[in-house]
Amino acid sequence: MKSFKKVAVTILAAVMMLLISTTVFAADSPVKTSFNASLTKKTVTYTGKKQQPKVVVKNEAGKTIKAKYYTVKVKTCKNAGTYKVTIIGKGKYAGYTQTLTYKIKAKTQKVTLKSTDKYTVKASAVKKNSKTLKKAIKVTKKTGKVSYTTNNSKIKVNKNGKIVVAKGTKKGTYQVKVTVKAKNYKTVNKYITVTVK
């Protein structure tokens, strides 16, 4: 009976020591307190100026956390594109991070064709020689670089924006695509028809 009591006391003592050591370990271990971060605006449009994202951080109870408890890391947001916004916790939130996505959209260009979008030339006029049409293509209100492509090698546009119809071009309707490209702006395409009759 005495030996049984000794064994029981020994086991009890071991359990108590284990509980004490576990409690101390838990107290010394860092606890990651989470938060919920969001952006006031996830998407904006390019303006030519810096547009840094505004972050709102709330705790698990939904209350706003003071800025001293976190750091926001993000590159300079100016050009059109997608950016990563990383919120790093500090103090009692140390060890917890959250990453959000912020986007600056390309701006729309207001491109106008000041010239006509329809040209006509007689087949007889290009039977023996090529013909350069008098009215040049005029693009206004553009931001970027203008380029031209056609759907047939017989139709070209020279450096002055004038349409050149090659010798021997057959009767039909041809198309010239006017493309305006610029960084941070949406690409714009305008179309011109050239009719050989």
Image (spheres, rainbow, N blue to C red):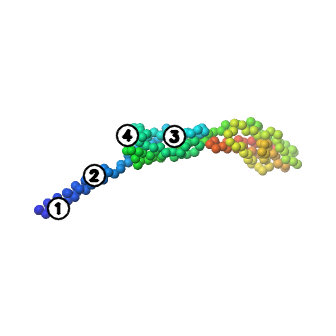
Q: Are marks 4 and 2 in contact (CB under 8 Å)?
A: no
Question: Which residue matches tag 1?
Answer: 7
Does residue 110 appear left or right of residue 86 in this picture? right
Residue density around tag 4, few if under 14, some if 14–19, many if 20 or more, within 10 Å: few
Q: Earlier in the sequence, mark 2 or mark 3?
A: 2
Question: Which residue matches tag 3?
Answer: 53
Q: Earlier in the sequence, mark 3 or mark 1?
A: 1
Front-lying residue, 147 or 14: 14
- Say which quarter of the image contains residue 160: top right
Whole-percent x, y for residue 169 in the image: 82, 48
Label 3 secondary element: loop
Q: Amino acid at mark 3?
A: Pro
Residue at the location (81% across, 45% down)?
164
Residue at the location (41% across, 42% down)?
69
CA distance for labels 2 and 1: 25 Å
CA distance for labels 4 and 3: 24 Å
CA distance for labels 2 and 3: 42 Å
CA distance for labels 4 and 2: 27 Å
Q: Earlier in the sequence, mark 2 or mark 1?
A: 1
Question: Which residue matches tag 4?
Answer: 61
- Quick one: quadrant of the C terminus? top right
CA distance for labels 4 and 1: 49 Å
Q: Indicate which label's residue lies in the foreground, 4 or 3.
A: 3
